[in-house]
């Protein structure tokens, strides 16, 4: 059987373990996030995607990361409060992780291996890099930080329609 994201698990922001197999059959947008980044306002767009498509089998998953400019220095509680108060985030947020280097979370190692970035690079370049995953748990596309969530909507719609 081909490896998928469903073989991984991650810690939720509240410290509880979460098997990604819980999202089996859904289209996912997995994002490394930060609260003090120029791209932080994208939380609003991510939440809009969550609201628009969640009833059709879509889910945003947020993974805070402090590797880029130390723009996510807060505790899990700080991150959760920031996301809720400022952006009304309803999608699952996970514990702070690393997306590059020797401590890279296994999920992000897999995502990077499956979807190369700019000029074929494997490394994540900055906060708010986004990975679109189909209903079978296969990464299908990587989006740069500057790609707004709104621009990803047509790709989400295609995946939802193709696998409905």
Image (spheres, helix red, strand yellow):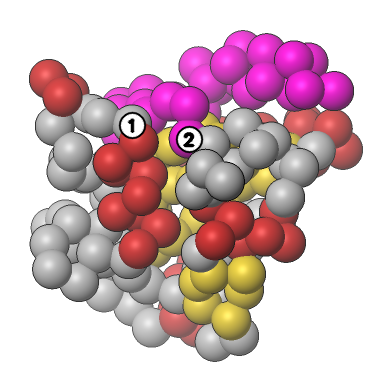
Q: Residue at x 68, y 13 (%)?
A: 158
The spot of residue 57 in percent (x, y) is 80, 38
Q: Which residue range is magenta in the image?
A: 139-164
Q: Is residue 31 magenta?
A: no
Q: Which residue is mark 1?
A: 115
Quarter residue 164 falls in: top right
Residue 105 is left or right of residue 91, and the answer is left
Q: Is residue 51 above or below residue 69?
A: above
Residue 92 is left or right of residue 66, and the answer is right
Is residue 43 in view from this perspective?
A: no
The spot of residue 76 in percent (x, y) is 45, 81
Q: Which residue is mark 2?
A: 139
The spot of residue 129 in percent (x, y) is 33, 39
Front residue of 56/126: it is 56
Residue 6 is left or right of residue 102, and the answer is right
The spot of residue 112 in percent (x, y) is 29, 42
Spatial separation of the CA atoms under disc 2 and disc 1: 7 Å
How packed is label 2: few (under 14 Cα within 10 Å), some, or many (20 or more)? many
In the picture, the disc for residue 35 is none
Q: Residue at x 44, y 47 (%)?
A: 31
* Of the image marks 2 and 1, the number of the one nearer the N terminus: 1
How packed is label 1: few (under 14 Cα within 10 Å), some, or many (20 or more)? some
């Amino acid at each position: 059987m081909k490896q998928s994201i469903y073989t991984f698990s991650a810690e939720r922001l509240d410290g509880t373990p979460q098997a990604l197999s819980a999202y089996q059959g859904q289209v996912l947008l997995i994002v490394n996030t930060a609260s003090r980044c120029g791209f932080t306002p994208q939380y609003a767009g991510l939440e809009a995607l969550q609201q628009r498509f969640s009833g059709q089998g879509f889910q945003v998953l947020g993974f805070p990361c402090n590797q880029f400019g130390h723009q996510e220095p807060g505790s899990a509680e700080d991150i959760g409060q920031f996301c809720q108060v400022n952006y009304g985030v309803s999608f699952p947020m996970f514990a702070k992780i690393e997306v590059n280097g020797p401590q890279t979370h296994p999920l992000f190692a897999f995502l990077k291996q499956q979807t190369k970035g700019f000029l074929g690079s494997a490394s994540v370049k900055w906060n708010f890099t986004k990975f679109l995953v189909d209903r079978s748990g296969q990464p299908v596309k990587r989006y740069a930080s500057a790609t707004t969530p709104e621009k990803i909507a047509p790709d989400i719609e295609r995946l939802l329609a193709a696998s409905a």
